[in-house]
Amino acid sequence: MTATEIVFLLFAVIAVGSALLAMTTTQLVHSALWLVVTLGAVAGCFVLMTAEFVAWVQVLVYVGSVVVLVIFALMLTRQQTTVSAEVTGNRWTAAVLGLVAAAGLGATVVAGFRGEPIEGNRVGTAGSLGEVLFNDWVLPFEILSGVLLAALIGAIVISRSGTER
Amino acid sequence: MPLLYPLVLSAALFGIGLYGVLARRNAVMMLLGVELMLNAVNLNLVAFDAWFADQLHTGQVLTLFTITIAAAEIGLGLAIVLALFRAVRTVDVDEVGASS
């Protein structure tokens, strides 16, 4: 077992453990902070799979902005009465369905890709990704900027619509 | 590194995210579960990109697109949750379903 595999398995254990904590803890802000740990560990996995630019984007967008947005939303929607149970009544159905999904996906990938190695000889630096992004993926990139603009305008309209009444 | 490590990690994260979406009562926490599932997909895309050694870096470029879509989704989703909170003074999905 190489050093890369050991570090990857370490990140994987951290990611799964903190994701479980994020989805089960009753403290809502703690849950968002555990999600930061999960997303950071996944970013570490990206670096180990030679995708360093994607890892930085993950840290910037997810840890930097998405979690901050979520914490803002948690603060703004704080309820007067504390809810005793944070999970719904169908918690065990949800747990069974999650387990079935994970086991099914896991069995599929084990059956399909057992013994395949990752060589990682094409590093995804900012330079190489930018080259393909602005040579071969320009049209999807521009469409996506339109989608993002529409989503942001929609978010502003939705969050302002109740204030005038 | 075997390709299976990231794929199995991705399957586990997807299952945990699915549990979060179905089991949490707080609507903001449901959105966090969706984010976790999207991150599992990103992990798959990056793993297959590194395995395939694609000239166009298809997997990593698609991962960047997915991250952008996820940012748009969480922005819109949180705006809807805030509008819901303003309307019925709760973000508990059980109570919202029962009252309407």
Image (spheres, coloured by chain):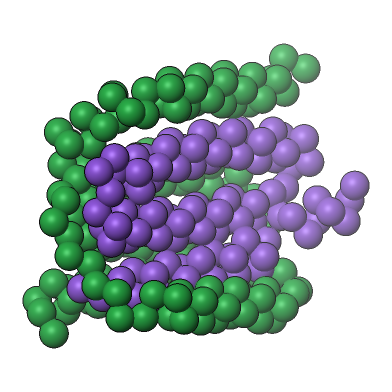
The purple-coloured chain is labelled B
**Looking at the image, is A62 positioned above or below residue A91?**
above
In front of the other: B27 or A46: A46
Position in image of residue A147 (x %, y %): 53, 25
Residue drawn 24% across the image and 72% down it: A117
Q: Is residue B100 left or right of residue A1?
A: right
Q: Residue at 51%, 76% (x, y): give it.
A: A108
Q: Quadrant of residue A104?
A: bottom right
Residue B99 located left or right of residue B20: right
Residue A1 coordinates in the image, percent (x, y): 13, 85
Q: Nearer the viewer, residue A37 or B59?
A: B59
Where on the picture, by quarter, is residue A56?
A: top left
Q: Is residue A36 visible?
A: no
Side (left or right) of A58 relative to A112:
left
Q: Colour of chain A?
A: green
Quick one: which residue is furthest to the left in this view? Answer: A3
User: Could you tell me how many numbered marks the image carries?
Assistant: 0
Question: What quarter of the picture does the C terminus of chain A occupy?
Answer: top right
Q: Position of residue A98 (x, y in %)?
A: 60, 74
State whether residue A32 is above or below residue A103: above
